[in-house]
Image: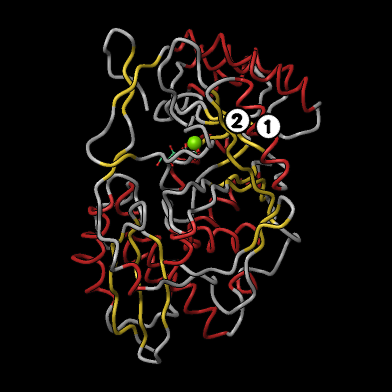
């Protein structure tokens, strides 16, 4: 069998997605997600101009060899653009291999290690009361684990906190918007939120919180300590993770579990944190971290240290990523939790899929492959529309960490 076409499709059914379609001479099609929020066209070009020509004529079964060819052969290794492009190829090739085998992809990855994948939804509100209502809505929908974000008194806008209906979209159309950030105001407010949540919902509900890289190491240590009485499932991205020694400092001060890695793109980004047991959950995703092949290596390394996975699953990766992620999640021994921000109905029409949310868990479909395809004709009606994440500044105008 040979690859005869590798086509890159950019579309924007409400938000931008980059998709790779690999076609074989047997008429099989494999789909990969290559969406890098706010930098979409760089991955589209990397794939179209530099990767696709190298794929034509290759045997799609040689997944590991093609992975190594793209990683080592490029000379320039790692980085979000490269690793997202390789991920899309990897996902599409696993999709094809599973279709040839006539099996759902998880069967090729070792079969099911669990009945379903625990997911967490996003509850957020401008005030603590609004946030409590958002948590109630999630419980009614069946969620068994919930990430909570809330507005901070004195700050006009807080990233991750949406409109009155609770929905938020990370990127906005046009150039990046700017908002003002105050760490002091934030840190003083957060314990009040979690105290109110525990009062209302009791001790059992798994609650997660995302700090979005905004704190210094000692501030993160302080917040982790302040939140200990409310025993979070995790505190995510407490500091920017380029300085990984920061996690040593945070760890020395708090038992609040730590999650990091949604902006990591390869195993080398994870190695120190995992081997030194400085984190509890690794948040790399199939789309941004080299695909299923590379994610399996990261999970295997993490398994040695009782670090579990908690993959990034925002609306800014396509349903193809969610489909592939669920086959990965259900198969590995050290799965922890999967983020699940449901896509808008139109996105699910553009990317028909068979995964299901059932009583707090997600399960992949059972048809051959990863179970997600694309309606190219529908996608063509929604051309690329630039959108960007917002930017944070301190009250004195200093550009702050994202
Ligand atoms: C999360 C993330 C998102 C990101 C977004 C960036 O935990 O889901 O932090 O909110 O900011 O995916 O593209
Ligand atoms: Mg996050």
Q: Are marks 2 and 1 in contact (CB under 8 Å)?
A: yes
Give the mark nearest the N terminus, 2 or 1. 2
Residue 148: mark in rendering: 2
From the image, tell me which residue sits under label 1: 207
Q: Quadrant of residue 92?
A: bottom left
As helix, strand or loop, the secondary structure at mark 1 comes to strand
Q: Name the residue at 73% across, 43% down.
A: 140
Q: Is residue 175 left or right of residue 29?
A: left
With respect to residue 76, does 363 lie above or below? Answer: below
Q: Is residue 341 left or right of residue 9?
A: right
Closer to the camera in the image, 152 or 91: 152
Q: Quadrant of the N terminus?
A: bottom left
Q: Residues within 10 Å of mark 1 (few under 14, many from 20)?
A: many
Q: Name the residue at 75% across, 22% down.
A: 198
With respect to residue 40, does 218 lie above or below? Answer: above
Q: Is residue 137 left or right of residue 84?
A: right
Q: Quadrant of residue 378?
A: bottom left
Closer to the camera in the image, 208 or 358: 358
Q: Name the residue at 32% across, 57% down.
A: 12
As helix, strand or loop, the secondary structure at mark 2 comes to strand
User: Disc 2 and disc 1: Cα gap in Å?
Assistant: 7 Å
Q: Quadrant of the C terminus?
A: top left
Q: Quadrant of ligand 1?
A: top left
Q: Position of residue 260 (x, y in %)?
A: 52, 35
């Amino acid at each position: 069998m040979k690859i005869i076409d590798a086509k890159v499709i950019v579309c924007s059914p409400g938000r931008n997605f980059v998709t790779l379609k690999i076609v074989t001479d047997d008429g099989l099609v494999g789909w990969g997600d290559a969406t890098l929020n706010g930098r979409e066209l760089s991955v589209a070009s990397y794939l179209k101009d530099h990767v696709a020509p190298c794929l034509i004529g290759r045997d799609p079964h040689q997944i590991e060899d093609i992975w190594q060819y793209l990683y080592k052969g490029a000379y320039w290794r790692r980085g979000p653009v490269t690793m997202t492009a390789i991920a899309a190829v990897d996902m599409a090739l696993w999709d094809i291999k599973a279709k040839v085998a006539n099996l759902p992809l998880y069967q090729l990855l070792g079969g099911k290690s669990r009945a379903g994948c625990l997911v967490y939804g996003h509850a957020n509100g401008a005030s603590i009361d609004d946030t409590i209502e958002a948590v109630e809505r999630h419980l009614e929908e069946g969620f068994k684990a919930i990430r909570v974000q809330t507005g901070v008194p004195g700050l006009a806008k807080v990233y991750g906190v949406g409109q009155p209906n609770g929905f938020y979209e990370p990127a906005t159309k046009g150039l990046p918007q700017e908002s003002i950030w105050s760490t002091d105001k934030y840190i003083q407010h957060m314990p009040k939120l979690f105290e109110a949540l525990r009062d209302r919902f009791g001790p059992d509900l798994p609650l997660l919180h995302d700090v979005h890289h905004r704190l210094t190491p000692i501030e993160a240590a302080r917040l982790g300590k302040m939140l200990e009485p409310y025993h979070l499932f995790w505190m995510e991205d407490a500091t920017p993770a380029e300085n990984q020694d920061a996690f040593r400092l945070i760890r020395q001060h708090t038992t609040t579990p730590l999650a990091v890695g949604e902006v990591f793109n390869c195993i080398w980004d994870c190695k120190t944190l995992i081997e030194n047991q400085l984190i509890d959950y690794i948040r790399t995703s199939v789309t941004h971290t080299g695909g299923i092949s590379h994610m399996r290596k990261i999970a295997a390394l993490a398994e040695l240290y009782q670090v579990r996975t908690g993959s990034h699953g925002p609306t800014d990766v396509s349903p193809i990523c969610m489909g592939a992620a669920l086959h990965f999640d259900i198969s590995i021994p050290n799965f922890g939790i999967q983020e699940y921000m449901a896509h808008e109905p139109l996105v699910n029409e553009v990317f028909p899929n068979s995964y299901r949310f059932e009583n707090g868990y997600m399960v992949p479909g059972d048809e051959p492959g990863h179970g997600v395809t694309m309606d190219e004709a529908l996608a063509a009606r929604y051309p690329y529309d630039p959108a960007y994440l917002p930017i944070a500044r301190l009250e004195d105008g200093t550009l702050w960490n994202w």
